[in-house]
Image: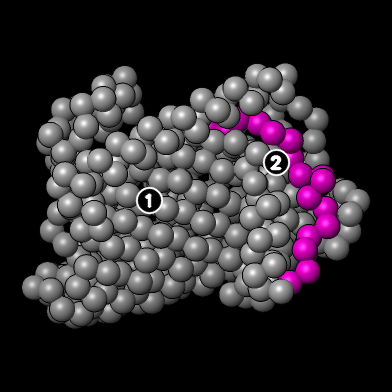
Amino acid sequence: MNFWYNNKIIDIFIISILLSSAAIGAAQQKKLWTGNIYFENDLFTETDQNYTNGIKFSLVSPNLQSFEEDDQLPDWFTHINQQLTFFHPKIKVNHNIVISFAQVMYTPEDIDSKTLIEDQRPYAGWLYFGTAYHARSEHQLDTIELNLGVVGPLALAHETQDFIHDLRGLEKSNGWDNQLKNEPGLIALYEHKHKFISQTANYGIGYDVILHAGGAVGNVATYLNTGFSVRGGWKIPDDFGTSSVRPGGDNSAPGKGWVLNNGFGIHMFASVDSRFVIRDIFLDGNTFRDSHSVDKELWVADASVGLSVTVENVKISFARVFRTREFKKQPHSHSYGSLSISFWQFF
């Protein structure tokens, strides 16, 4: 069994390395890719529990003529895309490919105990590579995304947290021996966004409202979700908002740039995402092996408020995210900070 798991993980990361190389190669050809860096942690709210850390790197391609054939993508990457046509949105508008690499981690409330605490959530990490397909018009964005990775010790969440705690001089969590076991993970999702925008939003003072709805299927997460975001300020970027680290969350829209006529932009935003949760491996435990689990809540919601500043081709955003209780015996809701930096024409 361990041999099978290890070979699956090796296959996943070979694919991730190859596809990442393709992204960089295409970026170097046209120099129009958008780069995004996300860092989330509950250190911003002075806690160290539940969803405690998330790091994500992503690249958004320039506008493509086709997902299957485009001179801005290497030939062999195009061949891979041709095998994934069932994931490609069919709307004939602007097309973008998003390539991402991320790690998230979860810990119980009591991180001092070395023994398993049955009433608190399991220790868990999720390391994954993602490929998303965007079909985008001025007012709509359809995203189909596939995330592949690993849950368990091979996700290196224990080592990552120890490294961060060493840097900050904090005590280490003592219960990582009780984390979820190694398991290859998959999430496939679809999400639709629709934007209502004031005429002056991209040029001066204005606002927009972005609605979204979708769903995901996989052994890591299965859910239906819906929500909205509202933005108001000076020269709002021509994209689909700022999202936390979540499937379907890369909303950057390269091609037109963020601040029309260059210069400076600033806006505030607020958003809500509500989910009907059918499967959550970080609460339900391993799919194919016995592991620690807790009774999850079926309805979970995130609400966030934040500020975004755009200077030329760089956008910096920070949000405070509030999450409702995720499992029955969780004593209270959770909160964390989400920082993102985006570079248009990154490569």
Secondary-structure class at tag 2: helix
Q: At label 2, which amino acid type do we have? A: Pro
Quarter location, residue 171? bottom right
- Residue to which mark 2 is pinned: 153
- Residue to which mark 1 is pinned: 58
Mark 2, residues whose alpha carbon is within 10 Å: few (<14), some, or many (≥20)? many
Spatial CA distance of label 1 from label 2 is 23 Å
Query: Taking 347 as reference, is 89 above or below it?
Result: above
Which label was assigned to residue 124? none
Q: Residue at x 65, y 24 (%)?
A: 5
Mark 1 / mark 2, whichever is N-terminal: 1
Q: Which residues are magenta?
A: 170-186
Query: Taking 111 as reference, is 10 above or below it?
Result: above
Residue 176 within the segment the image draws in magenta:
yes
Looking at the picture, tell me which residue is in the foreground, 72 or 262.
72
Image coordinates for residue 313, horizontal then vertical, percent: 22, 68
Q: Residue at x 50, y 33 (%)?
A: 13
Quadrant into which the C terminus falls? bottom left
Circles 1 and 2: CB distance less than 8 Å? no
Residue 140 within the segment the image draws in magenta:
no
Is residue 269 shown left or right of residue 254? Answer: right
Color encoding of the figure:
one colour
Q: At label 1, which amino acid type do we have? A: Ser
Image coordinates for residue 268, horizontal then vertical, percent: 35, 77
Image coordinates for residue 239, horizontal then vertical, percent: 24, 59
Looking at the picture, tell me which residue is in the foreground, 18 or 309.
18
Q: Residue at x 29, y 41 (%)?
A: 23
